[in-house]
Amino acid sequence: MSKPSYLALYESGELEARAHLLAQMLTSCTLCPRQCRVNRLNGELGYCRAGANLMISSYFPHFGEERPLVGKGGSGTIFLTHCNLRCSFCQNYELSHGGEGEIVSVQRCGQMMMTLQYQGCHNINWVTPTHYAPQLVAALIHAIRLGLQLPIVYNCGGYESLEVIRLLDGIVDIYMPDAKFSSEDHAKQFANAPDYFERLKPVLKEMHRQVGDLQIQNGIAYRGLLIRHLVMPNDIAGSDRIFKFIAEEISKDNYVNIMAQYRPCYLAFDTPGINRRITMEEYNNAIQLAKKYGLHRGFSLTD
């Protein structure tokens, strides 16, 4: 298994140069497609409600992630506070909407990564990192100086800035974006992001260009793209168009975790159309749609 590519970037000085470019975005924040352009370094807050400092709610070896991430040692998750999507049905709404967490320095975050490595985790899993990309790369530099050698997982909502993803080339080893919606109307209704799918498509292509299909050795993923798709009631997610795009414009060998765990949370209880769990029929229909387009990794017992 090869070493993470960020080590070469660090040795060349390129990693610090990227960190500097990302940090500059905080003065007029353009880290996501919302383009709020607030000066977070001066205390201004945009749509995501994140300030200049990292806020982290928890970090621990996670055994509930995808099997290739978990292995025997777990995925070293760092749960970040706030979110640039703020979906109305969010299952972690205490973090994304409520701001549950504490301010952490980049040095402390780097130490957290090292703790997770010492605990035997197979990777460092940044959960909802979009609005904290500059701070996380700065923390990564500190962790490298302490001896970090684990792959970085960028576990995001899929509503990303293409410019930021390009700056992460060679830094992130495993991209794990959501593919939430293909419908403009539903993306607007539930995440106030009508352009979600149009933003998602070039981002997925760029992620795949950087890291390719998910690569697994001895049962553990070490590089590649892993797409998550949450099946929703009444096909709110628009699964057909998402699977068609992945199969035809990215790769039929792409790993797609088709998830059945939707349950109404936060505002979903009072929202017609999403105020119930999905049925087994709805989930099986999604699986059949994926197979129709030739997708085959991530939702079979052999993965």
Image (cartoon, rainbow, N blue to C red):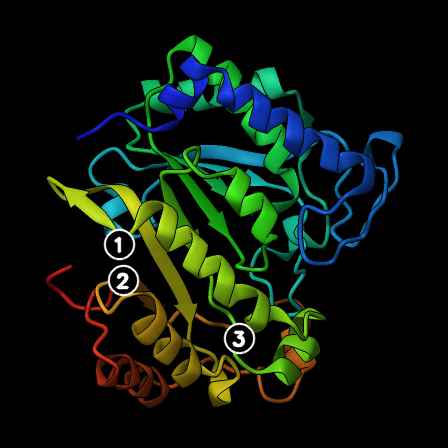
Q: Marks 2 and 3: which is nearer the front? A: 2
Cα distance, mark 1 to mark 2? 5 Å
- Where does label 2 land, which residue? 254
**In the picture, residue 105 is in which quadrant?**
top right
Q: Answer whether residue 177 is visible to the viewer in this image.
A: no
Counting residues from the start of the chain, the first of labels 1 and 3 encountered is 3
Residue 89 in the image: above or below residue 205: below
Give the residue at mark 3.
181
Residue 1 left/right relative to 210: left
Residue situated in front as seen by the camera: 43 or 212? 212
Q: Nearer the viewer, residue 129 or 246?
A: 246
Cβ–Cβ below 8 Å for labels 1 and 2? yes
Q: What amino acid is found at the position of numbered circle 2 in the picture?
A: Asn
Q: Secondary structure at mark 1?
A: loop
User: Which of the image's four quarters has the N terminus?
Assistant: top left
User: What's the amino acid at mark 3?
Assistant: Phe
> Looking at the picture, which amino acid does disc 1 mark?
Asp
Label 3 crowding class (10 Å Cα cut-off): few <14, some 14-19, many 20+?
many
